[in-house]
Structures are given as C-alpha cells and as structure tokens.
Amino acid sequence: MPFSYSQLNTYSTCPKQFEFANVKKIPRQISAGESFGSSVHNTLSKWGKLEAEKGKKKEEKDQLTMFEEPEEEAVPLTIDLLLDLWHQSFIVQGYSSKVDADSARTKGEVLMQKFYEWWEKETREVIAIEKGFSIAVDIDTIKGRFDRIERTAGKLIVIDYKTGGMRTQEEVDEDLQLSIYALACQDLFGEPCDELVLFFLSEEGITEVVTKRTPKQLSKAGDVIGSLSEQIDDEKFTATPSESACRRCPYRSICENSAV
C-alpha cells in the first residue's frame, strides 16, 4: 500500500496509534491545534493559487500585441484580501468554546499580517501550490503534497508551513518529511531543490529554518522508509507509550497502554 509521511510519522511515534488510525480506522475528534493549522494552510493555499493565476495572466498579457483586446486584470494581492481569505477559511470545529475559537481567529489575523510582511519583501515566482505527488522509493510508494514551491532569487525552494512548536536546526536537518519532499521535487521537476524550508508562523513573526539534502541523506531516508514500511507490512503494532506521545494521542482514552 502507498504510505504518506503522516502515516510513517504516526507509526514512528507509536505503532499502536498507527493501528488505531489506519488499520482499525477508529474515528476521532479534530483537535484545536489541527483545526487552526488546517485553517492557515487553506488560507495560504488560496493565496498561493491567486499568486499563480496573477503570474499566468501577466505572462499571457506580455504575449499580446498592441492590437488585441487587453485581458481582465488579476485581483490585487493586498493584505485586506489575505485577511478576507483567512476569515473565509477559518474552521470552527475542534475548539472547546466560542471564546477559544474567537481567540484563534484573532491570532490568525496576526499571523496573516506577519505572512504578508514576509511575502512582499521579494518578488516570488510560484511554481506549485498544494501539488500532490506519488513517488517510488525502492519498493515503496510514498504519496504527499507540497504546501508551496517557489523560485526566488534564482533558487528553487520547497516551503512547508508550520503553526506548531519550533524545531532546532538539527531536527530540521534530519526531518524525514523534508527528505521526502527533496525526492519528490527531483522526481516531478527534474531538478533538485536548492532549499527546503520549515516555515513557522507565530504571532511573534515568521521563522524560516532552512536545510538541504545530500545524496547520502536521501539514501538514508530511503532506508528509514523501507524499515518502517516493512514493520507495518509485518503488522508490528506494539505500543511504545511515553508521557509526551500519549498526551498528544487522540486515542489515549481507549488505549490500555496509555501513559497518561
């Protein structure tokens, strides 16, 4: 079966959680953090697609002769538009109260302001927004979706949005998801990406943690994927409880191995 990074990460965190989610397919409630993250991703996806459309219209306009009818101008990309997209995209599910939802909505407005300040600093060419992929890694098939790929200052850059806690440079350098993106970028576009970016959005501002991948690192990632998929195929679903993992697990209330 094809695997996503999310599935592999879940198995790596706890095989029992993977079994609950992907084998037994037990329904669960969306958390407030997941709801907020999805709202941010949906907003920036819509924004990115408008960017791409504007770039396409500009290219088509440049090819017109002076005797042809001018094309309709693309929607101006303003902060007011971005905030409108945020409110259109905000998901209310997952919050324990209206007060919590309203607080998250307000927080998102601040994040959009910070994103817009970052975005307008440079001219950016959008290559792909929310583009899906399915690639072969040895005998496994890995599927996923890019948040954003752009070409800025001549560099091909893969950007993955994050609204959760910060990660260290060492963690980002070892991140399996970014290794998968590097493999997929080469497979889809026929060229390696110059930079892989975990793009953290917070009320304090935008933090970009930048990394790259060497052929040796990509080979190591292939080995990790192969090992995890082999264990899944062998149905090794023994729980690996810990206080931190179990506290975040949506199945902790039904798991007899839960540490919390």
Image (cartoon, helix red, strand yellow):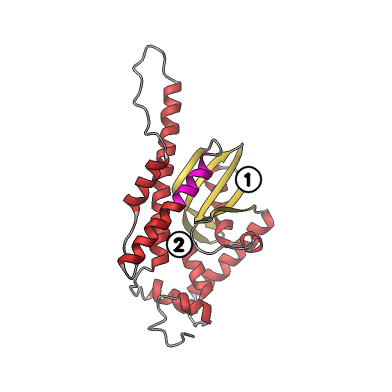
Q: Nearer the viewer, residue 149 or 138?
A: 149
Q: Earlier in the sequence, mark 2 or mark 1?
A: 2
Q: In the rendered image, which residue does mark 1 sit on? A: 194
Q: Nearer the viewer, residue 246 or 206?
A: 206
* Dots 2, 1 in contact, CB < 8 A: no
Q: Nearer the viewer, residue 177 or 165?
A: 165
Does the magenta stretch mainly form a helix, a strand or a loop?
A: helix
Q: Left or right of 140: which side holds 210?
A: right
Q: Nearer the viewer, mark 2 or mark 1?
A: 1
Q: Three-letter amino acid code at disc 2?
A: Pro
Q: What percent of the width, then of the height, locates residue 195?
A: 61, 48
Q: What percent of the width, then of the height, locates residue 75?
A: 37, 34
Q: Compared with residue 65, is residue 257 higher up or lower down, i.e. above or below? A: below
Q: Nearer the viewer, residue 237 or 141?
A: 237
Q: Three-letter amino acid code at disc 1?
A: Asp
Residue at 44% x, 37% y is 52
Q: What percent of the width, then of the height, locates residue 99?
A: 33, 65
Residue at 44% x, 43% y is 48
Q: Quadrant of residue 73?
A: top left
Q: Quadrant of residue 173?
A: bottom right
- For residue 234, the mark is none
Q: Left or right of 50: which side holds 228?
A: right
* Mark 1: few/some/many CA within 10 Å (<14, 14-19, 20+): some
Q: In the rendered image, which residue does mark 2 sit on? A: 2
Q: Compared with residue 41, is residue 20 higher up or lower down, i.e. above or below? A: below
Span highlighted in magenta in the image: 111-120
Disc 2 to disc 1, how far (Cα)?
Answer: 27 Å
Residue at 46% x, 56% y is 144
- Secondary structure at badge 1 equals loop
* Residue situated furthest top in the rendering: 67
Question: Does residue 116 belong to the magenta stretch?
Answer: yes
- Secondary structure at badge 2 equals loop
